[in-house]
Amino acid sequence: MPGNQEVMWPRLVANKILRKRLGSNNFVADFPCNKEIPSLDRPSLSPNSIFSHHKDTHNYRIFVSTWNVGGVAPPEDLDIEDLLDTGNTSCEIYVLGFQEIVPLSASNVLGSENSMVAMKWNSLIRRALNNKKKPHCLDKIQHSNEEQNKNIPGQDFRCIISKQMVGILITVWVRSYLCPYIRYPSVSCIGCGIMGCLGNKGSVSVRFRLHETSFCFVCSHLASGARQGDEKLRNSNVSEIFSRTSFPRGPSLDLPRKILDHDRVIFLGDLNYRISLPESNVRLLVDERDWKSLLENDQLRMELMNGQFEGWNEGSIQFAPTYKYRPNSDVYYGCFHQSKKGEKKRAPAWCDRIIWYGKGLKQHEYDRGEENFSDHRPVKSIFTAEVGVLHSLKQFQSFFLSERFDRITSQTDDFVCKGRSSFQI
């Protein structure tokens, strides 16, 4: 082990035990992440415009996915376009959450992240989203915002936040014409793992304001275990995440601090909730594709009704359990004809989930992907989100889509992410 890593351990352990948070702006992005984007020379507004409270409502499409990749780096030939479904679906915002992007080890748990793996995932995402040879198609989802015309500039994607905590990674991408309207991006990391505080389990939450609407996305990896009572550990993790996650109030002290205070909230990840039935019953019902009977005993569904997630929403599940598979196969782990002597059996379960809180979000799709190099299958969803837009800002749209704006943004390329690591390719 390198000497500098040995020196880091006592400080890292102390920080974790004392629950010292990383700075809210300590993340990777494609442009400087201050409360505003400083390099854009916005036109000034008159006092009457500034204090105008009349808002329009625009609908923006959001793709959300979660995937526990089992500590395996993405294969060189991985085509993530299949997961993003970019050929059939067109969204303005993409939010991708990952768990176990690095193998579990002492150095990783203590916070010495392998950023190279995160950079590799982000490079794959950038390449897939900005693939000019495979144009993004308009889909069946109806939308009313003015950017409906696909011939306007600014259709490429940029990363506004990418944050890793040990094996958890969340990365948020938006079409570049939305970048001027993204403000106050920040992150909050909560460790709930070993000793109740280390980062092998926990959450990475990101928030930002789009126009006049605040968003919060929580990517989590909760406590594992299929024994009776293990769901209480997961419930405890959720309680910790909700109570300890905190964001800056902003210069005007008007930004939400807690997760549930935001306008639009989505919780995603390997939540690890299981099915409260004997393993043999679970496997039989899976073989029969009797999702209804299985979901009646699903632990997360119970929590959604009257537990830690009361008041949250989840779409209808019409897909097979996403865990636990033998890697690079379509066979569930522990099947009698595939199991090895002494091998633990893991009953199939919907560990990987996407849920949302409050109003202003409408889910259109909820499905799983079939990428199979991990023991989990990815889960994905598409939403439309209602976003408040100040009516007075409509007159400035022509500026942001003009040649002048293009010149300004091109001049900022050399300034991107100075002072912090970058995954640009």
Image (cartoon, helix red, strand yellow):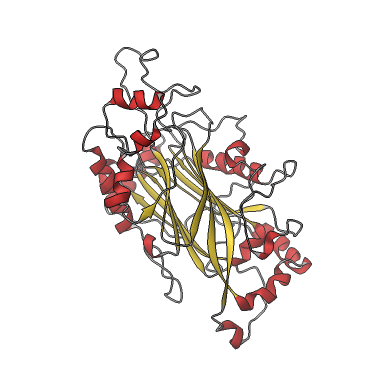
Give 10 or 164, whichever is nearer the viewer: 164
| Location of residue 201 with respect to 414 vertically, above or below | above
Say left or right for 116 vs 314: right
Quarter-wise, where is residue 226 in the image? top left
**Rendered-image quadrant of the C terminus:** top right
| Location of residue 399 with respect to 309 vertically, above or below | below
Most distant residue in the right direction: 403
Most distant residue in the left direction: 229
Pinpoint residue 376: horizontal percent, then vertical percent: 44, 32
**Rendered-image quadrant of the N terminus:** top left
Examine the rendering and report whether any part of residue 307 can be seen: no
Pinpoint residue 395: horizontal percent, then vertical percent: 69, 76
Pinpoint residue 237: horizontal percent, then vertical percent: 29, 47
Count of numbered circles in the view:
0
Residue at the image point whose x is 32% and y is 39% from the top: 296
Quarter-wise, where is residue 87 in the image? top right
Give 235 or 59, whichever is nearer the viewer: 59
Give 137 or 26, whichever is nearer the viewer: 137
Say left or right for 54 vs 187: right
Residue at the image point whose x is 31% and y is 54% from the top: 310
Residue at the image point whose x is 66% and y is 58% from the top: 176
Give 389 or 280, whichever is nearer the viewer: 280
Residue at the image point whose x is 45% and y is 77% from the top: 252
Pinpoint residue 103: horizontal percent, then vertical percent: 42, 32
